[in-house]
Image (cartoon, helix red, strand yellow):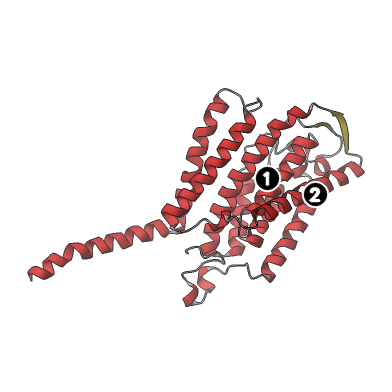
Amino acid sequence: TGAAVARRPPERMTVAQGLANRILTFPLTRLVLAILFVVAPVTMVQAPLRAGHLERSSWALPAAILASLVAYAAYRVYVATIERREASEFQGPGAGRELGLGMLLGAGLFCATLGIIAAAGAYAMGPRNPVGVVLVPLGGSIVSAVVEEILFRAVLFRIVEASLGSWLALLVSAVVFGLAHLANPGSGLIPATSIVVEAGILLAAAYMLTRRLWLPIGLHFAWNLTEAGIFGADISGRSLPGLFIARFAGPAWLTGGSFGPEASVVAVAICLTAGIAMLIVAARRGRWVAPFWARPREAAASASPAGEIA
């Protein structure tokens, strides 16, 4: 009897540990923790910049690089401590190739978008600004690409996909990404829906294709930098100094209005086409994940090709 009594505390500890482990591995718990791990330190880094209204000063680029490094480190800490695995989303081999390919794709997609708008007579390139003005949109492009891809693709899309499958993860992450742009100047139902259909799908497809963040980060960065930093267009409702002064004239459905070319029907058509093409390739490569209720029992512990926990 004494031995039986002595064994009871370890049993209760095992049950408690099992319960704690279930809570930590529950998708919603991991989603909240991951967001807190990343957002809290990034906010602390960016707060002094915003408090001093220095976003458009010479501090913008170094602050953006610092915030991006903090987001990267915070995500790796989250993955190591909560999910207890290596951050395969940031694996090194081939990173440069995927990042470069993403940059070429992002710049190419925006140039195609603006080329069609210009061909319709709705855009003209104005005078050139000093090269130094590009530093501000460069910093903004870096931090938005790194932080947003970590939050919306590595966190939101990946964790939802691990439980509900690729289709629902694609829908949820795209919609939330669009809703996150509702607070931007010049936004509304049409601009937010445009972000959902073009960027939400395209960037999630880029992540699905490689199961890493380098391709979507490169794509996101290059689109933003080309749009605002090179051609001087408004970006998600914000005006930043670009290398060239942009002159738009035409209906909002064609130019995107005050929100920027992302809200144009041209951008939606081009980016959606590219996103669908990536999704098709991802499907052919077996990168789609079924929802938990449609998986074989033996595959219940593995939720995706990267092996994240369900």
**Is 160 placed above or below 58 here?**
below
Place of residue 124 in the rendered image (x, y in percent of width and height, measured from the top left):
89, 35
Q: Examine the rendering and report whether any part of residue 238 can be seen.
A: no
User: Considering only vertical position in the picture, is 108 above or below 139?
Assistant: below
Q: Name the residue type under label 1.
A: Ala
Q: Residue furthest left?
A: 2
Asked if residue 109 shows in the view, the reply is: yes
- Secondary structure of the residue carrying tag 2 is helix
Along the line of sight, which residue is nearer the eye, 234 or 154?
Answer: 154
User: How would you rate the neighbour count of disc 1 (Cα within 10 Å): few for under 14, some for 14-19, many for 20 or more?
Assistant: many
Q: Residue furthest toward the top? A: 52
Q: For residue 16, what is the image quadrant?
A: bottom left
* Residue 166, picture quadrant: bottom right
Residue 147: image location, x then y, percent:
58, 44
Residue located beneath label 2 in the image:
108
Residue 171 vs residue 132: left or right?
left
Element under label 1? helix
Q: Quadrant of the N terminus?
A: bottom left
Give the residue displayed 87% in from the left and 45% down from the top: 115
- Position of residue 309 in the picture relative to residue 242 (left or right): left
Which residue is denoted by mark 1 in the rendering? 192
Q: Is residue 175 above or below residue 297?
A: above
